[in-house]
Structures are given as structure tokens and as C-alpha cells.
Image (cartoon, rainbow, N blue to C red):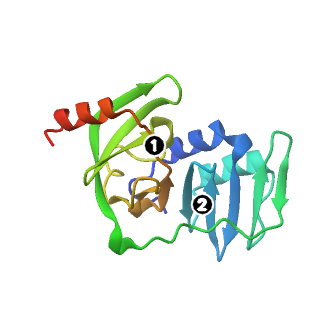
């Protein structure tokens, strides 16, 4: 069953783009897929995602274990599976997507989100798994160095740290805040 807000083709594109850095785990029947910058957990893998993962790894992870892809082959890790983040939702700061995009020569295009007084920069390429029509709802943030969460999708992205104060001042002016 497809999750509302999840862009399956975009998720497959993200997985293929980072195929040499992927980790795929299975714990309690739930699949976790990550490249260490974003992570999604799915109780049921869509057919297209399963096909891409099998192409990369050549096998399914065993229950309670994970597979890590290297440049040469997929290897089982001796440690436990990758668990989803358990965060105290009580302290979450609701976030919203802005219409602004920052182009950076170092990391590419960054989509800008706002949560309270904070501006969060997320790599645009890490948002391809999000359906632009439905997926940008129920987002939250826990602090400057914490992951950005799309709660309905069980999708987590690490923000890019930007320290240039002039960008923040310009954003505050543009957003009238």
C-alpha cells in the first residue's frame, strides 16, 4: 500500500544516486533504508523500491540484520539493524516549507524550511522521495543539529548547516519575521 505523500519514483532515484553508500535493514518486519543523510522506514516495501534494492544488494537482509553496500559488493553487517529515530514528539517544533531555495556551490540546491525562529536547509535531492502535492505536511524539527522529520512518511533528513548570518537576515526580511 502506497503511503500518501511518498513519491516512489523519487525514492528510487535517491537510492540509485547513493547506491554505494546505502544501508538496508530489517527489524520486526520493518525495513529501514538510509544513506546516513536521510532515512525512511517502511512496513511494506513498494515493488519498485524492492526491485531497486535487490539490484543493488542482490539479496534481502535477514531479520534483525542489515546489508551495507560498498563500491564492490553488498556485505552483511555484524551489528544490529538500523533503528528508526525515537524522538520525544512532545518537544517537536512544527515546521513549514518556504518558497525559497538557496544555491550553494559546495552542496547544491538547498530547500529552506522554517520552524519557530529557525531556518532549516535541506538538500533538494534528498526531498525527491516527498510528493510535492501531499508530502510537505506534519513536519517537525527538534533543534539546530537535530534531524528534520516528515512524520506521516517516517522519513528523516539531516539538515545542512549554514552559518552565514547575512542569509538568515535576508530570509527574515523576505518572510516578514
Residue at image point 43% right, 37% down: 162
Please provide percent x and percent y for residue 160.
48, 41
Q: Helix or strand or loop: what does disc 1 sit on?
A: helix
Which of discs 1 and 2 lies nearer the camera? The answer is 1
Quadrant holding the C terminus: top left
- Per the model, the C-alpha gap separating discs 1 and 2 is 19 Å
| Label drawn at residue 45 | 2
Residue at the spot of label 1: 127
- Residue 21 occupies which quadrant of the picture? top right
Q: Is residue 171 above or below residue 153?
A: above
Task: Sort mark 1 into few (<14), some (14-19) or many (20+) by Cα contacts within 10 Å.
Answer: many
Which residue is nearer to you in this view: 167 or 30?
167
Please provide percent x and percent y for residue 134.
32, 51
Left or right: residue 138 compared with residue 76:
left
Residue lying farthest bottom?
A: 28
Q: Helix or strand or loop: what does disc 2 sit on?
A: loop
Residue at image point 69% right, 63% down: 25
Which residue is nearer to you in this view: 103 or 75?
103
Please provide percent x and percent y for residue 13.
57, 39
In this figure, what is the number of numbered marks? 2
| Label drawn at residue 56 | none
- Residue 77 occupies which quadrant of the picture? bottom right
Amino acid at each position: 500500500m502506497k503511503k500518501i505523500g511518498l513519491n516512489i519514483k523519487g525514492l528510487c532515484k535517491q537510492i540509485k544516486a547513493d547506491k554505494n553508500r546505502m544501508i538496508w535493514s530489517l527489524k520486526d518486519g520493518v525495513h529501514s533504508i538510509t544513506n546516513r543523510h536521510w532515512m525512511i522506514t517502511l512496513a511494506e516495501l513498494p515493488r519498485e523500491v524492492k526491485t531497486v534494492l535487490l539490484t543493488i544488494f542482490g539479496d534481502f537482509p535477514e531479520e534483525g540484520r542489515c546489508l551495507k553496500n560498498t563500491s564492490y559488493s553488498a556485505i552483511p553487517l555484524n551489528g544490529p539493524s538500523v533503528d528508526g529515530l525515537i524522538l520525544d514528539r512532545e518537544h517537536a517544533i512544527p515546521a513549514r516549507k518556504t518558497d525559497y531555495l538557496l544555491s550553494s556551490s559546495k552542496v547544491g540546491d538547498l530547500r529552506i524550511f522554517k520552524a519557530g525562529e529557525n531556518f532549516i536547509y535541506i538538500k533538494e535531492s534528498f526531498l525527491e522521495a516527498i510528493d510535492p502535492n501531499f508530502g510537505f505536511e506534519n513536519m517537525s524539527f527538534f533543534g539546530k543539529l537535530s534531524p528534520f522529520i516528515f512524520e506521516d512518511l517516517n522519513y528523516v533528513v539531516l539538515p545542512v548547516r549554514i552559518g552565514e548570518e547575512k542569509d538568515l537576515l535576508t530570509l527574515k526580511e523576505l518572510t516578514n519575521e
